Each structure stands twice: as C-alpha cells, then as structure tokens.
Amino acid sequence: MREKKREQFDVVIIGGGAAGLTAAIYCGRARLNTLLIEKSLMGGLATYTNEIANFPGFPEEITGLGLMKLFHKQAKKFGVKFKLTDVKKVDFSNETKEVETFRNIYEAKTVIIASGGRPRTTGAENEEKFLFDKGISFCATCDAAANTGKTVMIIGSGDAAIEEGTFLSKFADKVIFSVIHDTGKMDCNEIAKEQALANSKMEFMWNTIVDSFEGEDHLKTVVLKNLKTSELERVDVDTCFEFIGYLPNTEIFNDIIELTDQEYIVTDENMYTGVEGVFACGDVRDKVLKQVATAVGDGAIAGVEAEKFISETEVFHNQLMQKEKIGFIYIYSAIDSVSRELLPIMKEIEDELKDVAKLNVVDMYKGKRLCERLDCNAEPMKIIFTKNGEIVGNTKDCSKNHVIGKLKELAAK
C-alpha cells in the first residue's frame, strides 16, 4: 500500500459548516497556515435552509446556501486551504496532532473539531426526496415564518418537539403531531404536555408512525400508519417537521476526547475539549441552541483560542524551556500585592546572576494554560527552575537569598 503523503499546518479544522468556516476566517486572518476539511457540502446543514431571517445583518433575509457561500469566500480571502474529503482517523496523543484522510495525513499544531451532526430521520418511504428545503424541515426557528397561516405536521412528542410545536403555533393555523404512544402519553415533561393539549391549534394523532411521504417537487402528503390497526391515513400538510433526535458526527472521536452519553463533545466556554491543543465548536458540542448565530460565536472563540494556544506553545518551548541558561520562572498573581512586590526582586536576581540565570514571568490568570503545562497550581506565587529545557525543581519560598542559593546550586551541578 502506498505510504500516505504528509503535510504540515498550524491549524486543521474538521468540518465546513458555519462554525468551521468562522473558525477558519479567524485563523486565516491571524495568518495561521490553516486547512479546513469538509466531507460533503461546504456550509453544512445551513445550506439546506431556504430562508434565513434571523441572522444579524441580513434584514432582507438570505438563503442558507447564499450565506455559507459568503462565509466560504471570506475564509478563502484570508488564505485558508480547503479539502473536500472524509476524515478517517485522528491521533491527538502527541503534541503534533494528526488528521488522516484516504490519501493524506495532515499534521497540525492544533485541531478544531466542527464536524456538526445530522437530524435523526424516520427512514420512511420517499423521505430523501423532500429533506430540508422540499417540505421536510428540522428547524422551527428557521422555517416558522414561512408557514404562516399553513398546516404543518410534527413527528415526535419529546420536549424539543413540543417546544418547537408551540413556537410554530404562533404562525401556522394548524400543528398536527404524529405520536407513537397511546392517547395522552408523550415523551415531554408534564407541564409542556398540559400546555400542548390545551393549545387549540394543536392536534394529536396517537399510535402513529410515518409510512411514507408523497408529493411532486414539494411535500404534499404525509401518510401515517396506525400501530394498532395498521390503517393508513393521508394527511395533507405544507411542511413536516421532524424532532426525533439529533446525531452528532463524533464516531471517530470515541475514546479520544470526552463525549456525553448522547455522544456530543464536552467543552468549556473557550471551546477547549480537555485534550491539549484540541478545540470543538458548533453543533457537535453539548449545547442548548443549535443555530447559525451560535455556531458563528463558537467558531470565533475556537479560532481565537487556537491562535492563542499556538502562541503560548511557542512561548513555552522558546522562552520558558530555553536551554541557554538556568531558568527560573516566576508564577505570580497580579491581584496579590505581595507577589506583585516581588517582581522587581526577581529582576534583581536575574541581574545579579545574568551570566548563568534567565528569568521568565507568568501571570497565573492571563497565562492559565501555560501554568497547566508547567503543572503549577500555586497561589499566589511559585518559582519553577529549569535546566537544559527541562523542569528540575520548584519552590514556594520566593525570598531573594533562597532563590539565589537554588540557582547557584543548579549552576554548579
């Protein structure tokens, strides 16, 4: 088998939806050598949305495809490179990350996962013909206004289905639910259930599943099958909304990064996954609202954090772990007066031992990630000693005589 070609990048982004493209824009603008890998359609699920009316800056509305084309164009403007291929495997175990496709292995200083997800579908006959912009939708927020005065159907009875149905009832004349359970039984919480049953615009078809979808260029009829009688009932609708779950695209990350029970990626507010140098953004994250606007916010944070991570990595290797002299890294708290007062003392020590010692200073709050790399959680101050690019000791005694003594001792070895 032919050996795969290797290429090096600062950042590799997995996924070309709104979050991935936004992250690419930020990384490209920061002049990072950036590669974005998308397996199918640049722009992700947003490209299937006929009309986006709630994205800031577009009062006249815009198609999802049109908006994503603008995102793509902007990323290319900043020098981002693109590959349309599927990621087969990743290796995040080393400082240099590896992202493997069918033909290549891409090495990166940092990786941003923006692989998104896909809505769970019914699998009923003809479903593929009407997905997204042809009558089957997965986003009430996106398509509610377009269904003003119309009849819509919702598949599902969980919290999301009832919540979205309630929102749709503000626009549509009739909201019909296909519920798999017996009369009165639903998967949502009791309060939502009571409110839904009391809503005059909502109707419920119990013990039913979708048998098929029918229509020409656009969905016209949903054929439901009664689970108890096997009878088929044809229901004419303008749109069918499916709220039966969402499947994040995280299969290749199992046992590599932390996932929820539903297999979403766990991150902190900075999109950090807990694996050094790996960030995640957009719908692949465990989050409340999945919209283009929130994906953009996630992508912006991930892009900034990736750039910061690379910068901090260079500081760590080139400055903190320098090999020219004995190093002493002063970790201090800018909000602690005593540790602030020691700053000029540290400089005096460096001046006194300038031939053998080099000082580096790290604010434990601003340089939180650097402190993590140094395995330092000292409060409010600590000194870490290095020699030949390796950590050789530490002390919480930051007095001048003690530090000078330790540095001379290390220099003598």
Image (cartoon, helix red, strand yellow):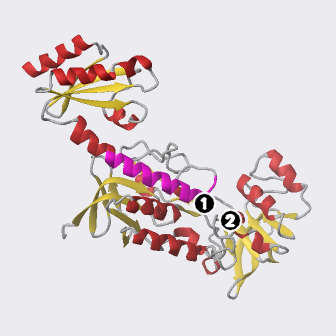
Residue 274's x, y, as percent?
42, 42
Q: Which residue position holds label 2?
A: 54
* For marks 2 and 1 on the same chain, the one whose residue lies earlier in the sequence: 2
Visible residue check, residue 32: yes
Residue 365's x, y, as percent?
43, 32
389 relative position to 377: left or right: left
Q: Which residue position holds label 1?
A: 293
Residue 12's x, y, as percent?
35, 60
Look at the image and say whether residue 164 sits in the magenta stretch.
no
For mark 2, give the secondary structure.
loop
Q: Are marks 2 and 1 in contact (CB under 8 Å)?
A: yes
Q: Residue at x 77, y 77 (%)?
A: 238
Query: Which mark, residue 384?
Result: none
Q: Give the main secondary structure, helix, strand or loop, of the magenta stretch.
A: helix
Look at the image and say whether residue 299 sits in the magenta stretch.
yes
Q: Which residues are magenta?
A: 289-311
User: Which of 368/222 is in front?
Assistant: 368
